[in-house]
């Protein structure tokens, strides 16, 4: 019954949190720290400013940046909002939004 939710108590200040059945205990533990109200930012690449140097591709720890038509492209589902790519882009073509 993967994906089914049950209410479980993680003993964090006495609050009950939903636990998903069918995922590992480690995933349940890590999910308990997620702030579900946080807005996730992602890297945005200005295609006009991107020079295609691939510096951001090699810097990204999540492997969330690929090259497409000689320009960098972010896979938003993989982006972990670390900003490493912003710091290393020599063309300043990447922002976090």
Image (cartoon, rainbow, N blue to C red):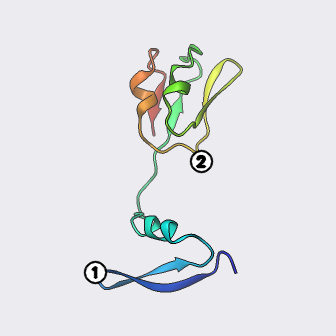
Residue under the point 41% across and 40% down? 82
Viewport quadrant of the N terminus: bottom right
Q: Is residue 4 above or below residue 35?
A: below
Q: Quadrant of residue 3?
A: bottom right
Q: Is residue 92 above or below residue 74?
A: above
In the rendered image, residue 70, in percent from the top left (x then y), is placed at 67, 17
Using a 10 Å C-alpha cutoff, classify the residue at mark 2 as few (fewer than 14 neighbours), some (14 to 19) or many (20 or more): few
What percent of the width, then of the height, locates residue 24?
56, 70
Give the mark nearest the N terminus, 2 or 1.
Answer: 1
Q: Which mark is residue 51?
A: none
Q: Secondary structure at mark 1?
A: loop
Name the one closer to the observer, 23 or 81: 23
- Asked if residue 76 is positioned above or below residue 26 in the image, the reply reads above
Residue at 31 percent across and 85 percent down: it is: 14
**Residue 36 seen from this side:** no
Label disc, if present, on residue 13 of the rendered structure: 1
Residue wearing tag 2: 77
Label 2 to label 1: alpha-carbon separation = 31 Å
**Residue 46 placed where, x, y %?**
54, 25
Near-viewer residue (61 or 24) = 24
Q: Secondary structure at mark 2?
A: loop
Q: Quadrant of the C terminus?
A: top left
Residue 56, horizontal then vertical, whole percent: 51, 25
Which residue does the image show at 53% across and 40% down from the upper left? 62
């Amino acid at each position: 019954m993967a994906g089914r939710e049950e209410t479980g108590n993680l003993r964090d200040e006495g609050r009950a949190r939903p636990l998903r059945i069918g995922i590992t205990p480690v995933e349940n533990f890590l999910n308990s720290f997620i702030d579900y109200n946080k807005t996730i930012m992602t890297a945005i690449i200005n295609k006009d400013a991107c020079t295609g140097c691939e510096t951001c591709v090699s810097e990204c720890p999540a492997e969330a940046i690929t090259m497409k038509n000689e320009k960098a492209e972010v896979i938003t589902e993989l982006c972990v909002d670390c900003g490493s790519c912003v710091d290393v882009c020599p063309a300043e073509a990447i922002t976090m939004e």
